[in-house]
């Protein structure tokens, strides 16, 4: 093996290691794209991208997987009849314990908001999203989109 071949091998190994580390870091973070499901039927509904904005997490619809609803007809105020793609439906999430909480989630199908918390599960491949109002709560699982 020549010195040049050895250097290429070392460079390839370092690059592979860097990609593996990046993938591991992503799995430990809710940042990225998530497939959501209709809580009543279980059918794929949207793709939501979670990003960090000003120290908090925000989730924005970036794709509709079910185009039966394209606007937020049930929403009030500024969101009323606005397009779902580009709409922020999760906001003000801050780190707490092993997850994030203190935020709000919007369910466009009925225009209602709820207190929200999220927690990574299944090694970062899934996100448990809980909305709670009063004494009731509902948890839904979103899948990471690669």
Image (cartoon, grey):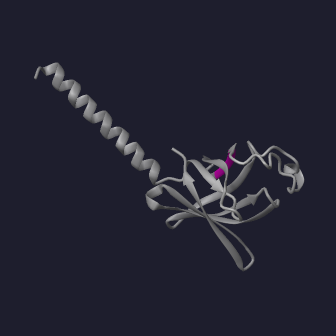
Q: Is residue 7 above or below residue 142?
A: above
Q: Is residue 59 magenta?
A: yes
Residue that sits furthest to the bottom in the current view: 135
* Residue occupying image coordinates x 49% and y 65%: 98
Specify the quadrant that holds the N terminus.
Answer: top left
Residue 2 lies left or right of residue 112; in this view the side is: left
Seen in the image, is 135 located left or right of residue 54?
right
Q: Nearer the viewer, residue 106 or 144?
A: 144
Please identify the quarter of the rendering in which residue 62 is found: top right
Number of numbered discs: 0
Q: Position of residue 88 (x, y in %)?
A: 73, 49
Q: Residue at x 86, y 57 (%)?
A: 74
Q: Is residue 138 magenta?
A: no
Magenta stretch prevailing secondary structure: strand
Question: Magenta residues?
Answer: 58-62
Q: Give left or right: position of 19 versus 47.
A: left
Image x and y of residue 29, in percent: 50, 53
Snapshot quadrant of residue 38: bottom right
- Residue 1, above or below 92: above
Residue at 45% across, 54% down: 28
Percent x, y of residue 31: 55, 49
Which residue ends up furthest to the left in the rendered image? 1
The residue lying at 82 percent from left, 61 percent from top is 110
Relative placement, left or right, of 70 versus 51 is right
Above or below residue 21? Residue 142 is below
């Amino acid at each position: 093996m020549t010195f040049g071949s050895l250097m290429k091998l070392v460079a390839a190994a370092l690059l592979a290691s860097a990609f593996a580390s990046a993938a591991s870091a992503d799995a430990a973070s809710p940042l990225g794209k998530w497939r959501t499901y209709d809580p009543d039927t279980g059918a794929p509904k949207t793709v939501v991208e979670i990003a960090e904005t000003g120290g908090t997490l925000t989730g924005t619809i970036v794709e509709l997987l079910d185009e039966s609803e394209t606007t937020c007809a049930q929403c009030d105020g500024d969101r009323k009849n606005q397009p779902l793609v580009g709409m922020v439906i999760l906001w003000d999430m801050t780190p707490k314990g092993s997850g994030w909480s203190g935020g709000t989630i919007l369910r466009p199908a009925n225009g209602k908001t709820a207190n929200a918390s999220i927690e990574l599960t299944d090694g970062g491949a899934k996100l448990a999203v809980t909305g709670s109002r009063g004494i009731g709560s509902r948890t839904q699982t979103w899948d990471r989109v690669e």
